[in-house]
Image (cartoon, helix red, strand yellow):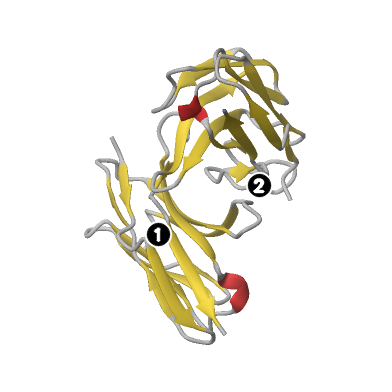
Amino acid sequence: AQTVTQSQPEMSVQEAETVTLSCTYDTSENNYYLFWYKQPPSRQMILVIRQEAYKQQNATENRFSVNFQKAAKSFSLKISDSQLGDTAMYFCAFVGIQGAQKLVFGQGTRLTINP
Amino acid sequence: DAGITQSPRHKVTETGTPVTLRCHQTENHRYMYWYRQDPGHGLRLIHYSYGVKDTDKGEVSDGYSVSRSKTEDFLLTLESATSSQTSVYFCAISDLGTGASGLSSYEQYFGPGTRLTVT
């Protein structure tokens, strides 16, 4: 069974700083997708970025980028020039391409951006 | 935004009463999911559906049942609610390939959540 681990329950940085959230996973599959979801106080789950395992290039979406290390099974999220609106829970998630596309989530990291 | 709604958005009920949560989608997506979110656990899969009348269990299915009689609706039922089922419940959808709304495969899109309190 796949597992996803986020080892940082909480993080706090100053506005405009860069912050990196860690995620590791365990799987025996070779092809899969990884995601970072953001959950602000509104509780809505928002997809931030996704990475396809067969692509070596790290995904980037504006201020958000990932460092995907397939051999190490590591998938960290970097937020550059952090903004107050980035304050949220962040969840790392894994889905294999076999079967019913069931997402496996990490426990989450609560990120606070301070003014 | 993906067309996913959940009802009710908030509910308080007493132990032992039946409760049904509804998820409705307008995207015509094949897969639908029910998760619960609890502090320290992230989101955990309760049940999922891969088509009309086709459902299967997730990792925390005890005490829950589901039904899907139409593509657009996925119901989650707590037959006899317990305090341990106090949680926030999320519905999600996904599909293979790219749908008409532009949603990409393997990504799941979530409803707004239902906060359920069992007293």
- B111 left or right of A61 in image: right
- B4 left or right of A105 in image: right
Q: Residue at x 61, y 22 (%)?
A: B14
> As displayed, is residue A56 above or below residue B60?
below
Total tally of numbered discs in the picture: 2
Tell me the crowding category of disc 2: few under 14, some 14 to 19, or many 20 or more residues within 10 angstroms, Cα based. Answer: many
Q: To which chain does the residue with label 1 belong?
A: A
- A6 left or right of B6 in image: left
Q: x and y percent of residue B79 in the render?
A: 56, 12
Q: Quadrant of residue B41?
A: top left
Q: Secondary structure at mark 2?
A: loop
In front: label 1 or label 2:
2
Q: To which chain does the residue with label 2 belong?
A: B
Q: Residue at x 30, y 45 (%)?
A: A30
Please state which amino acid type lies under the numbered disc 1: Lys
Res B115 seen here: yes
Q: x and y percent of residue B37 in the render?
A: 50, 41
Instruction: Please tell me which residue lies in front, A105 or A12.
Output: A12
Q: Secondary structure at mark 1?
A: loop
Q: x and y percent of residue B22 in the render?
A: 69, 26
Res A57 seen here: no
Instruction: Please tell me which residue lies in front, A72 or A6.
Output: A6
Q: State whether discs 1 and 2 lie on one chain.
A: no
Q: Give the labeled residue for mark 1.
A: A55
Q: Residue at x 72, y 45 (%)?
A: B2
Q: x and y percent of residue A4 in the render?
A: 33, 48
Q: Residue at x 52, y 77 (%)?
A: A113
Q: Give the labeled residue for mark 2.
A: B103
> As displayed, is residue B18 above or below residue A59?
above
Please state which amino acid type lies under the numbered disc 2: Leu
Q: Report, in whole angstroms, how far the alpha carbon at label 1 lies from the one at label 2.
A: 20 Å
